[in-house]
Image (cartoon, grey):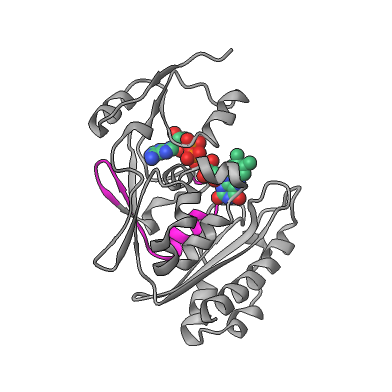
Amino acid sequence: MIAFDYHKPSRLAEAVALLAGAETRPLAGGMTLLPTIKNRLASPAALVDLSGLPGMTVIQEGAGVVTLGALARHADVAGSALVQARLPALARLAGSIGDPAVRHRGTIGGSLANNDPAADYPAAVLALGAVIVTDRREIAADDFFRGLFETALGPDEIVTAVRFPLPRRAAYAKLRSPASRYPLIGVFVAETAAGVRVAMTGAGHGVLRVAEFEQALAKSFAPEAVSGLRLSAAGFASDIHAEAAYRAHLASVMAARAVAEALA
Ligand SMILES: Cc1cc2nc3c(=O)[nH]c(=O)nc-3n(C[C@H](O)[C@H](O)[C@H](O)COP(=O)(O)OP(=O)(O)OC[C@H]3O[C@@H](n4cnc5c(N)ncnc54)[C@H](O)[C@@H]3O)c2cc1C
């Protein structure tokens, strides 16, 4: 038996105050945190369940920005008529995460705070130049992801929402592991007001922008601009799922597929 205290606050300030306690962690969908505790890879003294906080599941649009509450579940994002109409690439990405059980529990805030190096959402957030809103500040996507399972979040900081500026066009392509459903490589391309942005997940060291693809697509936003580009395998991990050279090859293939879909 693994013992811990459980809190379910109904106000954000109360949740933040509780998180000041030693070894206290926020709980969202629990899809990662609970297995981690069950496998004894984490042993928090207390969990602060965020599900009682008001307004955290909102999905809304205003002033050219789509805002998702941090507790919006993957299935809610995939099924949202607003996201399907305004950010179809994000709706499709959310619908491709894991399996139905994961999509009905897992949240965008939990996914971003966890920052798994193969998670899908970080690629969209980085490529779209989204802003992560917390209980105390706003963090640009370029400053949020800090490598493997690391983010700019403080230990008692709560993601409350994510703001997505609307791109001119965007798409995401990935090759999923048939076992875990996580991408071996996922590439999100976006033509934004600030230019072309491309983010890749699954390379092994955390989500990152791919300058080679961005430069090529800025000159010509076409699949052929990236399909022939070969990234160095040195930047990719080898593991039981794929060799680095295969992942590097997949990067160009997925980038070209994403561009083709964005143009379709
Ligand atoms: C079988 C399986 C398959 C999966 N497949 C995929 C996949 O294909 N692609 C993919 O991207 N993901 C996948 N996932 C991950 C899943 O989609 C969830 O996004 C992820 O588990 C975290 O979200 P959660 O809401 O469950 O967070 P939790 O598990 O509750 O929390 C995760 C971490 O984030 C912290 N946290 C949670 N919410 C907040 C917040 N608002 N502010 C600050 N910190 C917070 C917690 O303290 C914890 O450290 C899979 C998971 C499983 C179990």
Image coordinates for residue 73, horizontal then vertical, percent: 46, 46
Nearer to us in this view, 261 or 20: 261
Identify the image quadrant of the N terminus: top right
- In this rendering, would 13 be left or right of 129? left
Residue 135 magenta-highlighted: yes
Residue at left offset 41%, top offset 68%: 85
Q: Report the magenta residues as a range.
A: 115-138
* Picture layout, residue 111 above or below residue 51: below
Residue at left offset 55%, top offset 81%: 264
* Picture layout, residue 260 above or below residue 98: below
Residue 23 can be seen in this image: yes
* Picture layout, residue 22 above or below residue 199: above
- In this rendering, would 50 be left or right of 187? left
Image coordinates for residue 149, horizontal then vertical, percent: 51, 43
- In this rendering, would 125 be left or right of 253? left
Residue at left offset 28%, top offset 30%: 16
Residue 116 can be seen in this image: no
Image-quadrant location for residue 19: top left
Image coordinates for residue 215, horizontal then vertical, percent: 49, 79
Image coordinates for residue 91, horizontal then vertical, percent: 48, 61
Residue at left offset 26%, top offset 26%: 17
Image-quadrant location for residue 96: bottom right
